[in-house]
């Protein structure tokens, strides 16, 4: 099944509608997105093969998805380590952090040391709404992801990429192209520049809303929250 992409304005409007007419809370959306991320990680490499996963989280909703994913990964048998240097102002981020601390999931401020001990890295720093300049402390982190020999799995967008224009022409993300990507709800136009394994997740759209935003809902199987969709089958 070929899937259409969704642009920045439509993606932002969809989020707003889900939390108004759709009656979802931000907690629910993060929980479903984070569960999808964790399931895709399991598909990529189960904990018996790659137990040590470094989860890099930004201060926004993308970071919240990463915090939720880490909790599920813990229960799946992984040993996640969190890099979360800038906590967002919304109280939900504090609650998600507390949940991980209660599970004794460690947090680190030393990204370079943590990545050296990891089997995979989840990039949940910036999502589809990112624009402008990458600010501290993230330039060095994104540069490390670009240069990493450890495989990287990006949530919704490789951090520093533009939703429509793809990777930046210069700066820390210029040569960054992760090994895997999960598109939440629908692929974004940036997948045109992506070269790795591609998943679609966040299984919560009703058909009426999907039709309104021209979203092709993939054929999920059973209880799966993700579907692997090669970029070659996305309508760019």
Image (cartoon, helix red, strand yellow):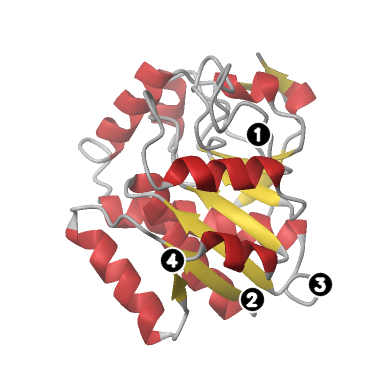
In what element is the residue under mark 1?
loop
Q: Are marks 4 and 1 in contact (CB under 8 Å)?
A: no
Residue 65 drawn at (x, y percent) = 43, 54
Instruction: Say few, some or many: other residues with alpha carbon within 10 Å of mark 3 (under 14 / 14 to 19 / 20 or more).
Output: few
Residue drawn at x 64%, y 76% as measured from the top left: 78
- Reply above or below: 121 against 19: below
Residue 87 drawn at (x, y percent) = 28, 57
In what element is the residue under mark 4?
loop
> Of circles 3 and 1, which is in front?
1
- Reply above or below: 130 against 99: above
Residue 202 seen by the camera: no
Residue under numbered circle 1: 176
Residue under numbered circle 3: 49
Disc ID at residue 109: 4
Residue drawn at x 45%, y 22% as measured from the top left: 211
> Of circles 2 and 1, which is in front?
1
Residue drawn at x 41%, y 20% as measured from the top left: 8
Q: Where does the C terminus fall, quadrant-wise?
A: top right
Residue 161 seen by the camera: yes
Of 184 and 215, nearer the camera is 184
In what element is the residue under mark 2?
loop
Q: CA distance from mark 4 to mark 3?
A: 26 Å
Residue 158 drawn at (x, y percent) = 57, 36
- Reply above or below: 97 against 24: below
Q: CA distance from mark 4 to mark 1?
A: 22 Å
Answer left or right for 91 relative to 42: left
Q: Earlier in the sequence, mark 4 or mark 1?
A: 4
Residue drawn at x 26%, y 70% as measured from the top left: 95
Residue under numbered circle 2: 78
Instruction: Say few, some or many: other residues with alpha carbon within 10 Å of mark 4 (under 14 / 14 to 19 / 20 or more).
Output: few
Q: CA distance from mark 3 to mark 2?
A: 10 Å
Q: Earlier in the sequence, mark 3 or mark 2?
A: 3
């Amino acid at each position: 099944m070929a899937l259409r992409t969704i642009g920045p304005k439509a993606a932002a409007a969809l989020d707003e509608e889900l939390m108004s007419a759709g009656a979802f809370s931000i907690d629910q959306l993060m929980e479903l997105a984070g569960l999808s991320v964790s399931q895709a990680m399991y598909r990529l490499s189960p904990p018996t093969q790659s137990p040590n996963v470094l989860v890099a989280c930004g201060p926004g909703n993308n970071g919240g998805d990463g915090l939720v994913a880490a909790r599920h990964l813990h229960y799946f048998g992984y040993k996640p380590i969190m890099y979360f240097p800038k906590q967002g102002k919304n109280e939900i981020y504090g609650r998600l952090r507390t949940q991980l601390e209660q599970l004794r999931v460690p947090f680190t401020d030393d990204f370079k040391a943590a990545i050296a001990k990891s089997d995979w890295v989840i990039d949940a720093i910036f999502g589809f709404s990112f624009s402008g300049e990458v600010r501290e402390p993230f330039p060095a982190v994104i540069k490390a992801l670009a240069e990493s020999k450890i495989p990287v799995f990006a949530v919704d967008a490789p951090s520093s990429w533009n939703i429509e224009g793809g990777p930046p022409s210069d700066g820390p993300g210029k040569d960054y192209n992760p090994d895997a990507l999960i598109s939440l709800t629908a692929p974004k136009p940036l997948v045109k520049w992506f070269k790795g394994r591609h998943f679609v997740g966040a299984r919560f759209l009703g058909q009426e809303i999907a039709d309104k935003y021209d979203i092709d809902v993939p054929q999920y199987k059973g209880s799966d929250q993700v579907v692997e969709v090669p970029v070659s089958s996305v309508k760019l």
